[in-house]
Amino acid sequence: MLVKAYGYGIVEQNISGFYLRKTVDDHCPFLSKYLQGWACRLQRTKPLACKLWPFRIRGDPRFGREDEAYYKYGKHDFYVYAYPQCPGIVLGKPSTLFSQKVLPEFLNIRLGFQNKQIHSTSKLRPTPY
């Protein structure tokens, strides 16, 4: 879908699959500076991998620290890992909002129960052109 809209230059391929090609300053090409932070310009067409960023949600403890990564959600057992490259990641005990709203939303998206992001993305409204 992104290749069709933006051309093959937007992706790169390696042995693991296809990825968005980063900009020269190592950012996603769809990330725009907004006030003191960053905002994604793909809110309506965001790929699953982007919706789940900065988390990797697995059914097995592939990256270690399984006691800390383990999360039971309904009938499912998950191991949730954060990409350390994400500047928004803060180590420590998760907030109540994160535990009760954000993480369940990531898991619902990962399981295919939900498509739209509510708590796990910015609340920016697109500006008309």
Image: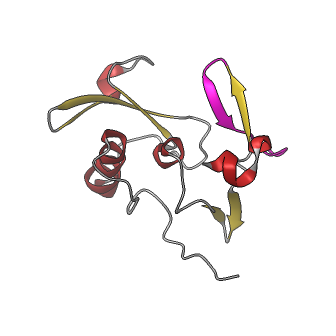
In magenta, the rendered stretch is 15-25
Q: Which residue is found at the position 64% from the left and 31% from the top?
A: 18
Q: Main SS of the magenta segment?
A: loop
Q: Is residue 26 visible?
A: no
> In this image, 59 relative to 7: left or right?
left
Residue 18 counted in the magenta span: yes
Q: Quadrant of residue 81?
A: top left
> From this viewpoint, which residue is outermost toward the bottom?
128
The way the protein has been coloured in the rendering is secondary structure
Q: Point out the image quarter for the C terminus.
A: bottom right
Residue 23 counted in the magenta span: yes
> In this image, 72 relative to 81: left or right?
left
> From this viewpoint, which residue is outermost toward the left?
75
Residue 73 x %, y %: 20, 38
> In this image, 107 relative to 124: left or right?
left
Residue 36 lies, with reference to residue 93, above or below; the image says below
Residue 35 lies, with reference to residue 81, above or below; the image says below
Residue 26 lies, with reference to residue 35, above or below; the image says above
Q: Which residue is found at the position 71% from the left and 64% from the top?
A: 33
> From this viewpoint, which residue is outermost toward the right?
24
Residue 6 x %, y %: 73, 52
Residue 3 x %, y %: 69, 45
Count the labels in the image.
0
Q: Which residue is found at the position 60% from the left and 48% from the top?
A: 1
Q: Which residue is found at the position 50% from the left and 65% from the top?
A: 122
Q: Is residue 41 visible?
A: yes
Residue 48 x %, y %: 48, 44
